[in-house]
Amino acid sequence: MPTGIVGEFLELKDGTDADLLAMQCGDFYEFFADDAETVADELDLKVSKKSSHGSSYPMAGVPLSELTPYLKALVERGYRVAVADQYETDDGGHAREVTRVVTPGTLLETTDADARYLATVVRADDAGSHTHPTGSSADAANAPDGSGGPEGPYGVAFADVTTGRFLVTTLDDLGDLRAELYRFDPAEVLPGPTVRNDDAVLAAVRDDLSGSVSVFDGEVFAPGRAAHAVRDQFGAETVDSVGLNSELAVRAAGAALAYVAETGAGVLASMTRLTVYRPTDHVDVDATTQRNLELTETMRGDREGSLFDTLDHTVTAAGGRLLREWLTRPKRDREELCRRLDSVDALASAALARDRLRETLDGAYDLERLAARATSGSAGPRELASVRDTLALLPVLSEALSGTPLAESPVAETLRCPDRDRARDLHDELAAALADDLPNTKTEGGIFRHGYDPELDDLIERHETAIEWIDSLSEREKRRHGLSHVTVDRNKTDGYYIQVGKSVADEVPDHYREIKTLKNSKRFVTDELAEREREILRIEEARGDLEYELFEELTETVAAMAELLQDVGRAFAEIDALASLATHAAGNDWTRPTLAEPGTLSIEAGRHPVVERTTDFVPNDLRLDEERGFLIVTGPNMSGKSTYMRQAALIQLLAQAGSFIPARSAEVGVVDGIYTRVGALDELAQGRSTFMVEMQELSNILHSATEESLVILDEVGRGTATYDGISLAWAATEYLHNEVRARTLFATHYHELTTLADHLPRVANVHVAVDERGDEVTFLRTVREGPTDRSYGVHVADLAGVPEPVVARAGDVLDRLREEKAIEAKGGSAAGGTGTTQAVFDLSSGSFADGADANGADANGATVDGPGTGRTDTDGTDTDGTGTGGTNTTEVDATEVDIDPETRAVIEELTDVDLAETAPIELLSRVQEWQDRLT
Ligand code: ADP
């Protein structure tokens, strides 16, 4: 074991579970051994060697004043860094101890405007919880409904040490947990004792998040200890009044508090408020849907082009954070939504007042962050001045509102919320204390205004007098002793001295004591000068001590008002976010949605909020209600189906974020969840099998959606063989219609599904119209009632130049396929699951058998042979499924006799091609191949 400084380093490192240790050695923080190599690699530092008792160790260091940016860079790369500071021991030596551990979730020094959350996740487990007293986790894993097993429930806390936000909830299952983690995007996740061994949770964190996972003392998750920590922090009454009675939530909260305390960031005091929320407060938007709807980043991972990016006109960091939160956590509380909408309404129609508000807010600093800096003691003089200047805006904003229509709106109420008297007092105290020109750091001096502290004023005055005496000394000495070339100056080694030119050095009076000879001059001191010097040093030391003390006191005063600063900061952020929504609404002709009871989504001339920015957008109507709850959307590829459905989901989401919407008008029923599944084209391009993913997403929707949800399905069953796919799509439609009864938009390329509208009462067809003239297809982007009148696969083959006989034959084959397959429709009655009627659709006749007829013993399969109620020339017995054979009609027989085997093979291949899954280039080469084979 090395001794000396390296030994000390290694010993300290041993005592911490941090990844890296930065140890103060005089004016530097040093990293030794492996840590030096790691840091040098990550941050491009030079490694030198440190010899210690015959061995040599790598060493890398950063100056004291530059530690912060280096720490930030390391922590943002996912390292947890312990910092050991040096202190003087009683015997005058130096020792060091770890004063804090900086981790991704507790990095206070962030300059990024985004929130930075630490998340703790705990699950009911054997170790100490009473909620799951029996059953091993293996038993729980087999629990069919997932309750109480590895599927949950979970207690989760989110703490943002940079702003003091602290939120706690319980979540039912892994899906909810994933959604919530994705929404908060924590920088660091602390799993509880069981969760840390749960591969599903860890995989979710790894796949969905950029943050890192830290393992921390499991004891802090123990119920008793956690409850104690929560009560200590927030007080017993608070805990009771916010209804934090779930043991899991308490455990998560307590562990987060313990971790923040343990890291020594000193910000516990800025966690002033415990926000407990229930998942039912917000619209359930699962992680997949958040991604699909590109709320905060596009599918490609860019921020630009996301909904947030499009809507964000905020002028402050806190306003941006809040707007982002509103979009990712839409609300179900109509009262709150109406309040936001009233505010946006007022702000949208008062352009001048809005501009004045925004200009004023532009000068606001991030009060929530400043509060955290003050409580941790890391705020400097300029930060306190930022608090002063931001508090000064409160009356300016009120002034900007008065006499405008906004004065009567909820915007004025928002501004009245914080305790304005206390805010003014704090402002006045800071204004009286802080000087106009402030130094960078609290150790530099010159922080306080004259008149703030009499003792300080006295010291400053005495200091000035002494300095004046020194400044005029050279003149006095010249006069008194007849010397020329005399200067008085000060440096580190000599202190104050009188410098005389060599030529007159012999003429100095006797009481001059020589201290140094230079080339052209000599330096002297006198007793008088030495006495003044001592006085100046005494005053400077006393002044430094006093200013530091006063500054600490002032910081404490500010820290004690953390809650007030958070209130004012929150009010400013709200006004900024609301003004941003209003600005966007006014500039883009958005309108106020009418909030309605669940079940209705009726949009007149709706547009896609993001696509409309870059395209000449064609608006479309949409109507979903009690009688018409399920729309099947058909139309060729690229016609606009997906855009139409996403715009519906986004309008729903915007309305529940309290925003205006891109439509001429809309009635939006408040939903409990928005669920989407869309084909992930990029994943297909990467060659990953997505059918499993597709089915998992579908399964999640079928389990989670309710009658009050909005469901968007963009193709179901595409990732498998046609008959598999169509069966699944068919069954999913029935289930959503009959059992779940959610409002649903379903785009499909299975033309067959459009017939469901005739037999399921709430299903209707719409299609995106195209205009075809000759070989030209013009996309009209207009959504019309009814299904498309054709299947586009064969049509595209025609457009691609496939020879006429092949296209004609493909059309025949397609008809045959349809004729030979009958699909049973299970229609739900308007009253729901009870009284279900069944019908069997015979594609050959284009009609359904009566429900009573079809309820026979074999009518339960998704696809069954047709009962032959249709054309008399089709007996329905030939169901070889290949679509190539069939001897049941003379017409087909005649055609078949004419066809040679090669042509037949080509037709088979052509029929089998899945246009959606085949790259255009491959299609072209295959068409070329077929043409070659046919000529
Ligand atoms: P589909 O889902 O039918 O394949 P998309 O919804 O992906 O089609 O739309 C294809 C293209 O058409 C997109 O690039 C989109 O920008 C454009 N588009 C869709 N709807 C509209 C519209 N209403 N007005 C203008 N352009 C539209």
Image (spheres, grey):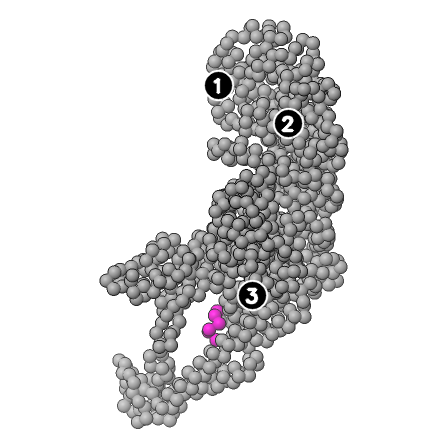
Q: Residue at horizontal 76%, vertical 32%?
A: 830
Q: Amino acid at mark 2?
A: Trp
45 relative to 132 in the view: left or right: left
56 relative to 598 in the view: left or right: left
Dot 2 falls on a residue whose secondary structure is helix
Q: CA distance from mark 3 to mark 2?
A: 57 Å
**337 inside magenta stretch:** no
Mark with earlier residue (3, 2): 3
Image height of 152 relative to 76, above or below: above
Q: Residue at horizontal 68%, vertical 15%?
A: 867
Dot 1 falls on a residue whose secondary structure is helix
Image height of 389 relative to 123, above or below: below
Q: Amino acid at mark 3?
A: Ala
Q: CA distance from mark 1 to mark 2?
A: 35 Å
Mark with earlier residue (1, 2): 2
Q: Say few, some or many: other residues with alpha carbon within 10 Å of mark 3 (under 14 / 14 to 19 / 20 or more).
A: many
Closer to us: 325 or 198: 198
Magenta highlight range: 440-445
> Which residue position holds label 1?
928
Q: Amino acid at mark 1?
A: Gln
Q: Say few, some or many: other residues with alpha carbon within 10 Å of mark 2 (under 14 / 14 to 19 / 20 or more).
A: many
> Which residue position holds label 3?
269
Q: Is residue 841 visible?
A: no
116 relative to 1 in the view: left or right: right
Q: Are the residues tagged 1 and 3 within 8 Å (C-beta)?
A: no
Which x, y percent locates residue 618? Answer: 66, 36
> Which residue position holds label 2?
730
Q: Residue at horizontal 75%, vertical 44%?
A: 596
Main SS of the magenta segment?
Answer: loop
Residue labelled 1 has its Cβ within 8 Å of some atom of ligand 1: no
